[in-house]
Image (cartoon, grey):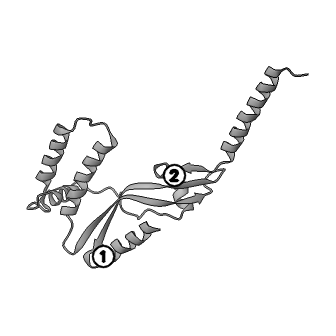
Amino acid sequence: MMDLEDVELKMELEDVLGRMVKKLNTRKRVSLPCITQEVFNRLEVTQRPGYFTPQPKDHLDKLIQASHDAASDHFMSSTGLHSLLQMVKEHTVVPSSEAYGHLWIDAFMYRAIAMTSPGKHLLLNLEYPVVSKDVSATSREETFGGVVDYVVMLVDKVHQSAIILAIDIYAMH
C-alpha cells in the first residue's frame, strides 16, 4: 500500500508528464527571423537573383559617389543624414535598446526616400503583420508569423494610391 507522500509524488509526476506531453504536441510558433532557407523553399518564397552579386571596385566607387550626390539639395542629404545620426548618438540616453536601433534605421529610411528617383515613390510600412502560416519544415509542424518591423516598396507614383489602399484593406482583415 502506498503512503500519502507516494500518492502525492505520483500525482505530481503525472501532472508534469501531462504538461510535457501537451507541450510536445503543441504546434511550435516560430518568429520570422528564425525562418531558414528550407522554410522559404516550402513557402515558395524565392530570392530575386543578382541582389548580392559582387561588383567591381570602380563600379562601387561610382555608386558611392552617386549616392552622395543624390538629393544633395534635400534636407535629408548625405550630410543631413550624418548630422542626424551624430545628434542621435550624442543625445540619446540609453543607446542599447530596440527603440535606439529604430532611430538609426529610420534615419537611413528617410535618406532612401530622399534619394528616390523622379516618378518613383518609396513606401514604408511599419510593423506589418504577417498572417500565421503552418509549415511542415522539420519533423513536426511549425507556425510562422508575427510582425515585420519594416517593409519597403519602391513603386511607380501612379500605382502608389492603389498599393496603399490594398495594404489598408489587408490590415483591416
Report helix, strand or loop for mark 2. loop
Judge depth for marks 2 and 1 and give the one in front: 1
**Nearer to me, 3 or 74:** 3
| Residue 30 seen from this side | yes
Give the CA separation, mark 2 to mark 1.
34 Å
**Most extreme residue toward the front, as rendered?**
4
Image disc number at residue 47: none
Tell me which label, 2 or 1, sits earlier in the chain: 2
- Type of amino acid under label 1: Ser
Image disc number at residue 36: 2
Task: Tell me which corner region of the image, top left, top right, bottom left or bottom right, holds residue 64.
Answer: bottom left
Q: On screen, 123 above or below 52?
A: below
Task: Tell me which corner region of the image, top left, top right, bottom left or bottom right, holds residue 120.
Answer: bottom left
| Residue that appears at 19% across and 39% down | 89
| Residue that appears at 22% across and 52% down | 107
Measured as percent of width and height from the top left, residue 171 is found at 42, 66
Q: On screen, 4 above or below 130?
A: above
Horizontal arrangement in the rendering, residue 53 relative to residue 22 (left or right): left
| Residue that appears at 47% across and 63% down | 46
Horizontal arrangement in the rendering, residue 97 relative to residue 91 (left or right): right
**Most extreme residue toward the bottom, as rendered?**
158
**Most extreme residue toward the left, as rendered?**
73
Please name the residue that numbered disc 1 is placed on: 161
**Nearer to me, 134 or 37:** 134
Report helix, strand or loop for mark 1. helix
Q: Badge 1: how crowded within 10 Å, few (<14), some, or many (20+)?
A: few
Measured as percent of width and height from the top left, residue 59 is found at 22, 59
| Residue that appears at 73% across and 35% down | 15
Q: On screen, 90 above or below 150?
A: above
